[in-house]
Image: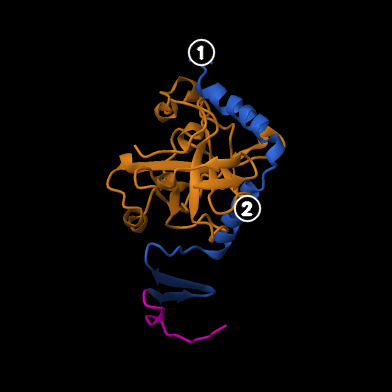
Chain colours: A orange, B blue
Amino acid sequence: MKITTSRFGTIDVDFSKVIEMKGPILGFERLRKFALIRHDSQSPFWWLQSAEDGTVAFVVVDPFMVKMDYEPVIGDDDIRLLEIASPADVLVLAIVTIRKEPFAATVNLRAPVIVHAAKRIAKQIVLETYPVQYALTETSPQAGTAVPRDSRQSGEGREAVSGR
Amino acid sequence: MLILTRKLGEKIQIGDDIRISFLEVRGKQVKVGVEAPGSVTVHREEVYRVIQDQNRNAALLNAGELPDMMDRLHRIVGGKKDAGEVGR
């Protein structure tokens, strides 16, 4: 499937790798299919590119890289909806709001996108706690010594995510 | 807008699978229960609006500056995280 985007030109996405939103990105209810594209192989940032509207893409990041002790609680209904059988199924993404000054970028920890990586289904959930605008630079003091969580980010440049 | 009057403990059925219960009234506060399938999102309206707005702001990106911006963001976050690593 070819997606014409305003950022990457025309990209060819294996249709089987497109993520289907079982619950919407709030405010974008009509967009149900997204491709998860790596910014580059070293970056903790990914793009969530709409497959239906080439002008809509979100920058997303592994929230645990931003806040080490982040503990999103996924409700039973959502666990059923996303067919989650074990925590290992789950990929958690937080939407980044880019601002003119890079240090001012914020991460939405209140409403993460929960992805079942193998089944490629996802939903934006809303947590009871955590800020909607969490400073990207407020990394915890232990961040520099923590075990890297980016084992899945090895590999070649930009590509659509595949199941694990 | 459809306006209905309900007593405590009574319910409103919406479609086949959404049910609203009125559980408690205390002064100006009403405690409401919502039963809905997992595919239906239920939020306090103000929370819903805040997240909608945040999502819309996040999606409004200036395509031209982005690759550079992404690299700068990477340095902010990745630089901290990878402080002890080599080969960057």
Q: Chain of mark 1?
A: B
Q: Residue at x 48, y 15 (%)?
A: B85
Q: Nearer the viewer, residue A68 or A155?
A: A155
**Percent of width and height locating residue A35:** 49, 45
Q: Amino acid at mark 2?
A: Arg
Residue A135 appears in which quarter of the rendering?
A: top right
Badge 1, how many Cα within 10 Å: few under 14, some, many 20+?
few
**Percent of width and height locating residue B48:** 55, 60
Q: Amino acid at mark 1?
A: Gly
Residue B53 appears in which quarter of the rendering?
A: bottom right
Position of residue B86 in the picture relative to residue A106 (left or right): left
3D distance between C-alphas at marks 2 and 1: 37 Å
Q: Residue at x 38, y 82 (%)?
A: B10
Q: Nearer the viewer, residue A66 or B67?
A: B67
Residue B11 shows up from this direction: yes
Residues rendered magenta in the picture: B1-17
